Amino acid sequence: MPQLDFDTLIIGSGLAGLTLALNLAQSKKVCLVTKQALLDSASGWAQGGIAAALSEEDSPDAHIRDTLAAGAGLCDEVVTRYVAENGPRAIEWLITQGVPFTRDQNNETGYHLTREGGHSVRRVIHAADTTGQAVQLTLGEKVRTHPNITVLEHHIAIDLITSAKLGHPDKNNNCCYGAYVLDSTAGRVDTIAAHCTVLATGGAGKVYLYTTNPDTATGDGIAMGWRAGCRVANMEFIQFHPTCLYHPHAKSFLISEAVRGEGGLLKLPDGSRFMPWHDERIELAPRDIVARAIDFEMKKRGLDCVYLDISHKPANFLREHFPNIYARCLELGIDITKQPIPVVPAAHYTCGGIVTDWNGKTDLDNLYAIGETAHTGLHGANRLASNSLLECLVFGQAAATDILRQRSMSAVQLPQWDESRVTDADEEIVISHNWDELRRFMWDYVGIVRTSKRLQRAQHRIKLLHEEINEYYANFRVTSDLLELRNLVDTADLIVQSAMLRHESRGLHFSRDYPDLLPQAQNTVLKR
């Protein structure tokens, strides 16, 4: 196959990638690569909404205070202000694109705003309880039909092509030229060259056995950026969403934070509440506190789950505000208007990632990272609810502005992918076994509550998996499953390395060996 040349290559089709593509496409030739279908991303699974100071009772300063409080001392205050102040403008852009947010004529904004854990006021704009889906459908249609955007579905990036990998001697000025990408349908590796390459692949929830994330969340961008020489920060801070539906047939189904925001109560099997014993903010405490409280009660009492009860609200209210949750639970025999919902915590969001500046620029020239893949400094040690889609919007637009400022350059001729010394795999069952082993020991040893001994056990197993996978990668043709497993193991290694370096308990990282908070908050930054 001849080399494919573009002005900008975007790897990932979540909200960050779609926002960037649409903001570039008026003057740039864009290629958007996604490893499944265009709309298959964690963004599309987001239920609650997008946080922004839109009402008269709210302000960017109040949004900043709530974000900093949730972030446990590690948010970058300047970045947080930048995001909060640009939030309303980002929402206005979505409205002009046609996103059908839920209306409320009794609110001066004209839209219904809900409240979630950690927020001091109602500031979360939403489209019923399927906000991510509504946003992705609206922007996805515009991306798919735009003449300057080429969408390559069922394509998974293998690795970035950098000057260091091409043998250029100056490692202090490493530059990205594009990426090698596997066409999963054709079984062919394409070489894609671009003046700017953007990692927007989302997080790494699938490194854990239980997660609210889709199957696409395998840490691809974080792992590729790390292998290419980017710094990675704060990977120990994995957010566990407190309320994932507990049911044998409910794979990764999230019960939105907004259910608690609208009055849902967490209860034990006997119907008694337990959050008042753990935090004065009760059900609306930040996610790390609520998740640890549930984990504590389940382990103390030997429970399989706890219960989220909103049946005291009018049935019509629940069907109107949570139609997707109501319908899915009803399919499984749970009527939320009459019964509590069984819930457990599950891995939900990767707060750390590739270190970037305000414009999404990484340590490599012409390489950007945006969305959950990036570490911007916004989330600190714990992300405030509904700040994730906001971050995608604000930094997607910021990266577009920076890329548009750059002078266009002709593409560099890159070497083709070399498969001359590999063969087809003879035992692909090894991949599924290794994937299962990884997710189980990460859940057992690197979960909500950690110890040094558990982390050491995980590190030992990761080392063995690394050796097996590197040997497999070197000798056999690449497949989507192999690439995802390789990225997950690299990402798991970064999580464990970071956790072992943090000798305190802060935000989402809780260690029994280091239960106290250090007087000075510092980021954990890893460098190759």
Image (cartoon, rainbow, N blue to C red):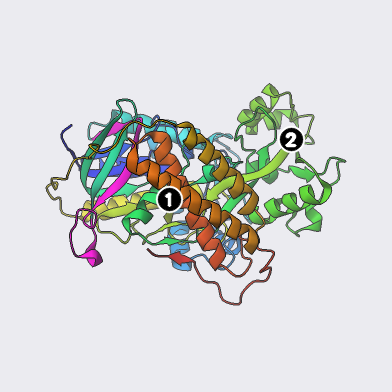
| Label 2 element class | strand
| Image quarter in which the C terminus is found | bottom left
Q: Which mark is residue 341?
A: 2
Q: Is residue 297 left or right of residue 195?
A: right
Q: Amino acid at mark 2?
A: Ile
Q: Amino acid at mark 1?
A: Thr
Q: Nearer the viewer, mark 2 or mark 1?
A: 1
| Residue 289 quadrant | bottom right
| Label 1 element class | helix
CA–CA distance in space, label 2 to label 1: 31 Å
Q: Residue at x 82, y 44 (%)?
A: 268
Q: Is residue 265 left or right of residue 112?
A: right
Within-10-Å neighbours for mark 2: few <14, some 14–19, many 20+: many
Coordinates of residue 143 in the picture (x, y in percent): 32, 33
Q: Earlier in the sequence, mark 2 or mark 1?
A: 2
Residue 93 shows up from this direction: no
Per the rendered image, the range of residues in magenta is 149-175
Tell which of 158 and 320 is nearer to you.
158
Number of labels in the image equals 2
Kindly indicate whether the residue at mark 1 contacts the one at mark 2 (C-beta within 8 angstroms). Answer: no
| Residue 258 quadrant | top right
Tell which of 221 and 405 is nearer to you.
221
* Magenta-drawn stretch contains 107: no
Tell which of 94 and 225 is nearer to you.
225
Q: Residue at x 79, y 29 (%)?
A: 338
Coordinates of residue 121 in the picture (x, y in percent): 62, 53
Coordinates of residue 457 in the picture (x, y in percent): 60, 56
Q: Which mark is residue 373?
A: 1
Residue 345 shows up from this direction: yes
* Magenta-drawn stretch contains 166: yes
